[in-house]
Image (cartoon, rainbow, N blue to C red):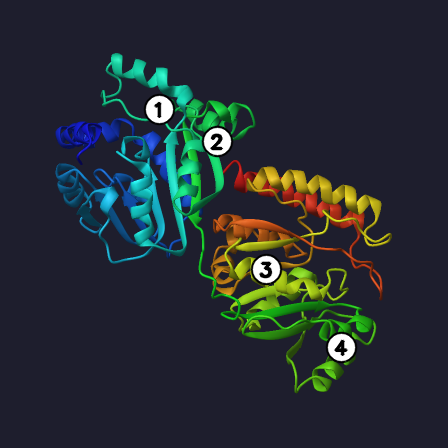
Amino acid sequence: MTDKVGKLFYKHFQDFALNFKRYRVMYRYYWSMIAHYHNYFIHEDDSVLEIGCGTGDTLSILKGINKTGIDFSENMIDVAKELHPDIEFHVMDAENIQLDNKYDVIVLSNVVSIFDNVIDVLNSVKRVCHPRTKIFITSPNYFWYPIVRLGELLRLKKKAPESSWLTPNDIRNMLHLTGFESYRSAKGVLIPINIPVISWFANKFFARLPLLNNLCLNNYIISRPIIDDADFENRYSSTIVIPARNESGNIEDAILRMPQFGKHIEIIFVEGNSTDDTWEKIKEIQSKYADTHDIKIMQQEGKGKGDAVRKGYRAATGDILMILDADLTMPPEELPKFYDALAFGKGEFINGCRLVYPMEKDAMRFLNILGNKFFSMAFSWLLESSIKDTLCGTKVMFRTDYEKLIKNKKFFGDFDPFGDFDLIFGAYKLNLKLIDLPIRYQERIYGDTNISRFKHGFILLRMCMYATTKIKFW
């Protein structure tokens, strides 16, 4: 800490440490709101590192295992060890992190503004990241600067040395310069002190609304390392689940048009109560291509595509899970692009998008297009990501992520007959980076659609409203 500002903050926190516990109790509502936001995305099995942990109070209420806290103030760490003996704490400069572990989650809560050099800190953070690490950064909204200074003058807040008030764009730029990408951002906390009922209502509802949320105290940014390892082309195996109901005429084409990619491809057909000879055709194709393709077949006891996908995924052995609708309107030839996007780290949940390129004349009916565009806008707002096409059948993710998603499935409930929203909502809750992959949507060659525009449209609308309560107003 050779910088003058760093020395000022070091002295500030050293002197403040003995009274910090009482101070945190006064403002525990505010700090609990930050932990509440983080805990929405942190999984119980995640390892967590907090940089600038202070007395460890926030870290103590975060989810996760193998929790570690570091801080440059010896006095702060002494208090943290006394208060939270079950957590590992170290006196350590953020610019020179010396830890042997790689963490799933790294938290920097309202500390980036006091660092001597944020770029040096982020370069140091890379030492304790693996390719799937998530970095949570909380910073104050500059709109609140005069309010905070007034609070210090009125002795409602302890006066601190002058710090940097970095904008979200400043932080995103420094993340980019150091090899990270920010993929999710939000704002929160309109009222940082607990006024019974009023604070709860304002922070739960008003703080989530467009325009009003620009007045929130906190800016939240979630980022992840940019993968620069080029050795992913043949690293992963894939399982392609093909739900099939009355699709007899498409079964063999699904095999003939399937490209080779990755280390190995496992194909699982799940037949779902067909009234034609789809099941007989699947058995025939499995036997016919047994020497060249790894094909597994099963019949569905339940109903709906979602049930079929879950059955196929339970039997899957591939590292990467893919869905291919048996109508082949999403061309099988496009699947290597999904593999590449996931394997090379472009996203962690790859969603097919049919609404970019022009479609063939009868590929999608007009009302379906309108419905898709409506749900696109609704879910882009909900998920804080640009999701243009929620209903494309092809969605791709790692099997390890899906296993976590299933454990957390009770959070959103079980009324999605399609399976698309189970996966999208679950991926958001797992804090995965969602990304659209444009495809050329083609006209169905065999059979008729199994989708009812109005019946299923109302189901989707109901799901959208329900998801709003679980994502925006939790």
Counting residues from the start of the chain, the first of labels 2 and 3 encountered is: 2
Counting residues from the start of the chain, the first of labels 3 and 4 encountered is: 4
Q: Mark 3, mark 1: which one is toward the viewer?
A: 3
Pointer 2 local density, CA inside 10 Å: few below 14, some 14–19, many at least 20? some
What is the distance, in whole Å, between disc 2 and disc 1 at their CAs? 14 Å
Q: Which mark is residue 193?
A: 1
What is the distance, in whole Å, between disc 3 and disc 4 at their CAs? 25 Å
Q: From the viewer's perspective, is 253 left or right of 27?
A: right
Q: Amino acid at mark 2?
A: Lys
What is the distance, in whole Å, between disc 3 and disc 1 at their CAs? 42 Å
Determine the residue positioned at 23% across, 46% down: 96
Give how far across and how far down residue 356 sits, in percent: 72, 47
Q: Nearer the viewer, residue 253 or 2?
A: 2
* Callout 4: SS: helix
Counting residues from the start of the chain, the first of labels 2 and 1 encountered is: 1
Q: Which mark is residue 204?
A: 2
Q: Amino acid at mark 3?
A: Val
Quadrant in the rendering for residue 165: top left
Q: Which mark is residue 396?
A: 3
Q: Nearer the viewer, residue 310 or 153?
A: 153
Q: Where does label 4 land, which residue? A: 279
* Callout 1: SS: loop
Q: Is residue 170 above or below residue 316?
A: above
Determine the residue positioned at 25% across, 43% down: 95
